[in-house]
Amino acid sequence: MKQQSITIYLYKTHSGNEYPVEFGFKDINAEDISHDHEYITGLCRQGCKNYNHSGGCPPFAPTFESIAKEYNSAILVFARLHSKYKTRRVKDSNNYYIHYRFQDIILSNFLNKMGQKIRKLFAPRVYFLGNGYCTGCGNRKCAFKEGMRKCRFPRKRTFSLEATGVNVEKTLKNVFGIKLEWYNRNNFRQVSYLTKAIGFFCCSPVIRDKVHTYLNQGFLHNPRIPMITAFSPPL
């Protein structure tokens, strides 16, 4: 099994600003994923308005156990942005949500762009689990939120790791040694970084190797993909 790969990338926004995103991935097996469907989806049920309303969220998402039966070889990916790179306007804000969303948008865009590209190239041999809510409808409202129970764009529909019952906090700690930091109204000036994660679950080790190779040599070094530029990590 390949060792974990960690690199730093400059993520360029549409406005031209650049932010150094720490990006890492590691080959694992499905057994390395910590999951508890009842507990994790219970947190969704108690604290998220998208529960039972969004087509990418519980209870409409599959269980991680059902995915792992067919896709046992995996690559776990994380992206992290340190809070010191916030803009002055964000740093001066007293709204904790603005602090969180600044980093969340950059990391989510980065990871989702990667996930959709891998899925397009390797589906159905790879099952992509993202972060956050499904964005498959683009600017349209989710069909489930309109009372329907059938997805308009099933090929673009994305479930997050958490929606399937994955305990992302425990998994990142076990696989990468990363401790998640969480924003709230009292600590938003003390949070040192925000971390997001996605996973590629493959039907075989051979397919996992191909995805691994593409991550190293294809996605982030493809000139057709804007807003991402690699540079060597500091020593």
Image: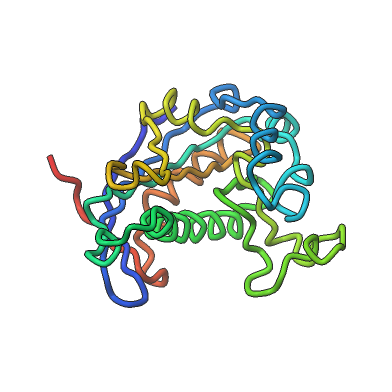
Image-quadrant location for residue 120:
bottom right
Q: Quadrant of residue 176?
A: top left
Q: Position of residue 210 (x, y in %)?
A: 50, 45
Q: What residue is at 37 percent from the left and 48 percent from the top?
A: 216
Percent position of residue 24, x then y: 36, 41
Q: How many marks?
A: 0
Residue at the extreme left:
235
The residue at the far bottom in this view is 15
Decide which of 187, 43 is in the foreground and name it. 187
Q: In the depicted view, which residue is nearer to us: 210 or 78?
A: 78
State the quadrant of the N terminus.
Answer: top left
Q: Residue at x 72, y 60 (%)?
A: 155
**Residue 143 at x, y percent in the picture:** 79, 65
Which residue does the image show at 53% across and 60% down from the upper left? 117
Relative to 186, 154 lies left or right? right
Q: Give the colour scheme of this rendering.
A: rainbow
- The one nearer the camera, 41 or 227, is 41
Instruction: Locate residue 105 relative to residue 136 in the image: left or right.
Output: left
Residue at (65, 37) in percent of width and height:
203
Q: Is residue 6 above or below residue 151?
A: above
Does residue 32 sit above or below 17 in this rendering? above
The x and y percentages for residue 137 are 68, 68
